Image (spheres, coloured by chain):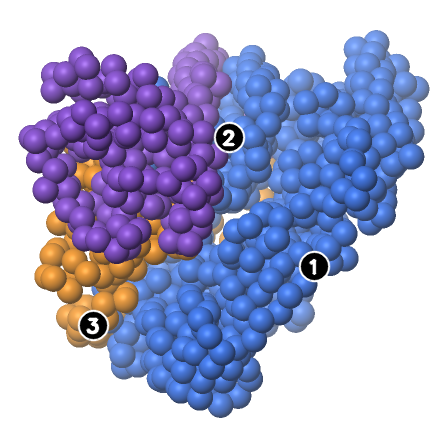
Chain colours: A orange, B blue, C purple
Amino acid sequence: MSEPTPAPRGSARFRSPVVRWGPYVLLGVVLVVALAIGASRQPKKNLSERTQAIAATIKCPQCTDESMATSNAPTSVAGRAEIARRLQAGQSSAEIRAFFASRYGDSVLLTPKGSGFDALIWILPVIVLVVGFAGLTAAFVRWRRLAPAAPTAGDRELVDEARHRTDDPPPSDEPDEPEADDEPPSSDEPDAEDQP
Amino acid sequence: MNLALGTIGVYLGVLITASAVATLVAGLVNRRGDLLKLTPWFAGSALLAALLACFAMERALITRDFTVLYVAHNGSSATPALYNFATMWGALEGSILLWTLILAGYTCAITIRFRQRLADPLVGWAMVVMFSVGLFFFGLMGSAANPFRAFSPPVGYDGPGPNPLLQNNPLMAFHPPVLYLGFVGFTVPFAFAIAALVTGRLGEGWLIETRRWTLFAFAFLSLGIVLGAWWSYEVLGWGGFWAWDPVENASFLPWLTGTAYLHSVMVQERRGMLRVWNLSLLCATFALTILGTFLTRSGVIESVHAFSDSDIGPALIGFFTLIVVVSIGLIAWRGDRLRSPGRIDSPVSREGAFLGNNLLFAAFAFVVLLGTVFPLLVEELTNRKISVGAPYFNRMVGPIVIALLFLMGVAPVLPWRKASIETMRHRLVWSAWGGGLTIVVAVALGATGFAPLLIFGLGGFVAGSAIRQIVLATRRQGWRGFVGRANGGMIVHLGVVLIAVAFAASAAYSHQSDHVLTPGQSATISGHRILYISSSTEVQPQRRSDIARVQVDGGKVYTPALRQYTAAGQVVGSPAVHTTVKDDVYLTLLAAPTHAGGAVTIRVIVEPLVFWLWVGGGVIFVGAFLSAFPGRRRNPIDPVSAPLATPVVAGGPPPPDADPDLVGAGDLS
Amino acid sequence: MTARPDAPVPPRRHRSRVVLVAAAAVGLVVVGLIVLLATSQKPEDSADSPLLGHPAPALVGTTLTGKPFSLSSYQGKFVLVNFFGSWCQPCQQEAPELRKWALEHNAKGDATLVNVVFNDTPDKVKSFFAAHGGASWPVLSGNTDSLALDWGVSKAPETFLVTPNGTVVWKTIAPVSQAELDQLLATGTAAATTTTTGK
């Protein structure tokens, strides 16, 4: 789609909301439908794939840091065969994992439990995110409280001086003006950011 | 002879870097510019010392000189030439040698780049830091990790050769050097960060000077990580390329903080804010490279990629402590100078997006680090053993990646300072539809699953934003629309999209099955037909291989094999991969025929879009270099270490009333 | 960036304090990490097993001589289950000790030794025993991979002691000696559930 013919700057305000937001609403509908269709299809996994999926969550006991899915050690090969046998016998992945844990100990499971001390590994990242987000929010609230300074006469003098000395206008102290619809806005112009 | 040459090289290196540090510090403290001007001599001779040591090692390897212990343990007359050459970095001591060589190279490069400003204290302190790090690594080689230990080989001795997994694929020759170019490259911005803190010149000058170095390091680190993944894929035989292994995580952590830095530094350049945060990120990135080196070499955490146990653990953790203490100390000391009166007007702005980006990357790095060291923590505190593997990382990292992809799509169209809904609505419509149509096309092609579809959609969204930016730029500037910080960055984003989409597709839509085939029998998997032709056995000096010949889709014949290395005794599978743009057919020989004309067991994994992972890595590499391309206009008023007052030096007179933080404290010549 | 005389500047003390506090917090976490890494031992194998104190898993197979074997038929006696391979050095080291112990208690009739092959071929095992004086006790050699899985065995040698009523009470991964085994039996290990670490 080519850019629309340059229109007077204020024309955006006169286009009706339907024209302005229609494409997004339509997109929303399309997305919901497509995702619903896609998500509802169940990919069928054969025995080998289901075995690999479970083996990927169990550590190979005789290797240094590999899962049963990736290792070729005899214990892993036997382990995968055992998983396949139990899958065919109808056991669930939780039961199979419990079997391995009951023989090799909890350390053979590659996912830490969600209870006790181990739960920290699940909780700490969430805490970090929440704290970080809260910190950012606090910072924005504080910044909002600091009123933006209006340029003083001294500031304007400096700007004029700099302007006369160089080719390029220095970055302006004033907030950027709202851009016209049909022009790439100046504030993300590649030129301004190509400085060495 | 090799031992002598190598040892001379190492000790010379220690001597040169030590005297460099002493001389430069004396010059800086006593304001003697003449001492600082000696830097090129120190840098050049340090590089020569490193080159001498490397030359000695390679000569020993090539001539199979088993009087050198390293060659006796890692070399062999049976190892082919390329792998023999690459054995220099195949084991622990040699890898330190490679690191030192690259560090000496970077030191020289900086000296050349800043040759006209060597008397500037900022550059001087940066060189002090570079030489100090060089002293540490030369010192390691002179003590705990000595590659030139002597050995008396018995008559007829032949070494065991490198680890069999390191002899399977030519990528061995490329992955470590490229990766180290990335790791070591981050020493440069770190050195300048420390220099800025020490000299108190905390304006944006040093940032602008080192931007390209950071980009180079980022480019090589990204490429190095992708090459490592490719190498794992081609060699290890399970059809995957990233297992959240501790060593992989160790290389990934500095990438995360480095990428966060590359984004937030733009906020600092534009608004003068986030100085403390950026300095911390830079110091953290370098510290993480040292931490990664420690994790890989100390044996504290088990990994299939780790080097063998050694004694350099304490030295590395000590160095890490030193770096952390110095960094935190300097930042705390200069805390008052780092304050900025600026503010960010609105969270819905590019600054806000970069802040969000940094928060997400910080969380990402935290998750990776926590998952890697948590087993240690649990063992120390509760005396139990647990394992944390790929399932944990995949589950925790998924939401973060999705949030990052969303930001990647939105941020390039966000204006600085404040965005209005109108602006965003107008600018995002194409990208949004790009994402939506990607999902529709994927669903039409039969894709399933909410998470992969979401990633495809976000990938389309991000690609839309990136392409929009590039199109606008090329319209106005022609070919220059592809270079420069913003445009190169968009190309890097495209590379990331390729990797994200390929990762999601290959993780979600792979099909695997095992087949027992007699000669001439074929099987069909996911639209591909494999035909087992025959088997053979090949005996070479260093290994014995059972090779199966398999034809894929009536075309080329591939040879997955099982190889038994005589020295190590272990049997290593050697997969064969049929790569197309659409998907890979990954063949592993599980069981060789027990008798002539017998059946083989072949595992076939069909993984979609894997090819695009490697392409994406290349695109990131190219994009980072494009991003470093100089802009058209060089602002004559370079807000960099230009001298004050009278001495007239290249760089032009400083603007009057300029911020003293930006203008340098003066030249000492 | 020029200073703005009009803009409110955050008080210098406040900003430094924030930075100091943040630096201290980060420093503490990093110091904790360093201490953790510096004091961590290299990972070692331990003889912890979740089987201790539980009924023994089934042990069913065929011996080297082709006879069928089942652990349940040995109820009422102590059984020492030893997983081994001819390739493993500690196994070679403990083989004579195990042999002496087995012969002694076979004669007494209160305990018996059962060997299970781990990651090895029957031929190599046969020559192993030929070199070590033969085996007059069951040596399971068929389908031993799933047996190893059932018992949580990941390396060789691993040795388990099963009481007469079928409970696993002891496991070691170190090579054993006859004296040690005799003492184990003598203390009536029904009460003790010891674990031993070692190489």
Q: Which mark is residue B329?
A: none
Q: Quadrant of residue A164?
A: top right
Judged from the image, the secondary structure of the residue bearing numbered disc 2 is loop
Q: Residue at x 23, y 67 (%)?
A: A47
B385 over B505 or under it: above or below: above
Three-letter code, disc 3: Lys
- Determine which residue is flagged by label 1: B541
The residue that label 2 is drawn on is B299
Mark 1 surroundings: few (<14), some (14-19) or many (≥20) residues within 10 A: few
Residue B294 image-quadrant placement: top right
Distance between the alpha carbons at the discs numbered 2 and 3:
41 Å
Quadrant, the N terminus of chain A: bottom left
Real-space Cα distance between discs 2 and 1?
31 Å
Give percent across and percent down for residue B400: 34, 47
Is label 1 or label 3 in front?
A: 1
- Viewer-side residue, C161 vs B507: C161
Parent chain of label 1: B
Give the residue drawn at x 40%, y 82%.
B518
Question: Which amino acid is tagged 2?
Answer: Gly
Q: Chain of mark 3?
A: A
Check the image and report above or below for C116 versus B78.
Answer: above
Q: Secondary structure at mark 3?
A: loop
Between residue C115 and residue B133, name the one nearer to us.
Answer: C115
Q: Residue B27 at what x, y percent from top left?
A: 84, 15
Say which mark, if any, is on residue A44: 3
Residue C11 showing in the rendered view: no
Closer to us: mark 2 or mark 3?
2
Residue at 49% across / 84% down in the picture?
B533
Q: Are marks 2 and 1 on the same chain?
A: yes
Mark 3, Cα crowd under 10 Å, few <14 / some 14-19 / many 20+, is few
Q: Relative to B622, does residue B224 appear above or below in the rendering? A: above
